Image (cartoon, helix red, strand yellow):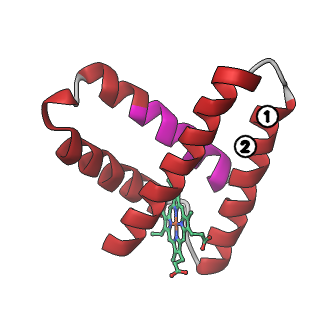
């Protein structure tokens, strides 16, 4: 579970990083968010094959948020918490219905 949390965090950071780049230079290209969505759907289908169930996602979300909190220390403000919670929820929302 611990290694998976690290993998999940890396996957998520990668997705957010790509989304950030798109926001900076290609956000007006409507296909970009769709592209991210289809990537996350496919990641969600892979997870179904691993046996991941709907109820596992909130557990990973809480572990990820706790890890981010521990790493950021004082920089983990309520705005940062809200932003990360929204980002993770968005990712899970797409992965979980794949
Ligand atoms: C925010 C949600 C999550 C993200 C972004 C995420 C991301 C990833 C990524 C990028 C990989 C590696 C690519 C792959 O093998 O498909 C992976 C693998 C994996 N994930 Fe997740 N994951 C999430 C949630 C979960 C949950 C809830 C579980 C179950 C508790 C889980 C279990 C696994 C397993 C078993 C693997 C394969 C590990 C291996 O091949 O050694 N993941 N995940």
C-alpha separation, residue under disc 2 versus residue under disc 1: 6 Å
**Main secondary structure type of the part rendered in magenta:** helix
Q: Quadrant of residue 31?
A: top right
Q: Quadrant of the N terminus?
A: bottom left
Label 1, residues with CA under 10 Å away: few <14, some 14-19, many ≥20: some
Kindly give the residue lying farthest to the front in the view shown. 25
**Residue 52's disc number:** none
Position above or below: 53 against 73: below
* Pointer 1 residue Cβ closer than 8 Å to ligand 1: no
Closer to us: 38 or 95? 38
Image position, residue 10 (x, y; %): 46, 57
- Left or right of 61? Residue 11 is right
The secondary element bearing badge 2 is classed as: helix
Which residue matches tag 2? Answer: 36
The front one of 41 and 24 is 24
Residue 38: percent from the left, percent from the top? 79, 49
Left or right, residue 64 beside residue 12: left
In the rendered view of the protein, which quadrant contains the C terminus? Answer: bottom right
Whether the magenta-drawn stretch holds residue 94 is answered as yes
Tell me the crowding category of disc 2: few under 14, some 14 to 19, or many 20 or more residues within 10 angstroms, Cα based.
some
Residue 72 in the figure: left or right of residue 74? right
User: Are the residues at dot 2 and dot 1 in contact (C-beta closer than 8 Å)?
Assistant: yes
Q: Which residue is mark 1?
A: 32
What's drawn in magenta, residue-wise?
A: 84-96
Q: What residue appears at the point 59 percent right and 46 percent down from the top-left corner?
A: 15
Q: Residue at point 22% right, 31% down? A: 76
| Foreground pick, 71 / 44 | 71
Percent of width and height locating residue 25 = 71, 23
| Snapshot quadrant of residue 63 | bottom left
* Rendered residue at 32%/20% (across/down): 79
| x and y, in percent, of residue 64 in the image | 35, 51
């Amino acid at each position: 579970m611990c290694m998976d949390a690290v993998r999940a965090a890396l996957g998520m950071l990668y997705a957010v990083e790509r989304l950030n780049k798109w926001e900076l230079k290609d956000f007006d290209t409507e296909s970009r968010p769709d592209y991210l969505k289809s990537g996350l759907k496919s990641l969600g289908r892979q997870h179904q094959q691993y046996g991941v169930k709907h109820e596992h996602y909130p557990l990973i979300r809480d572990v990820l948020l706790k890890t981010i909190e521990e790493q950021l220390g004082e920089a983990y403000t309520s705005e940062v918490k809200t932003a990360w919670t929204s980002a993770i929820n968005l990712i899970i929302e797409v992965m979980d219905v794949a």
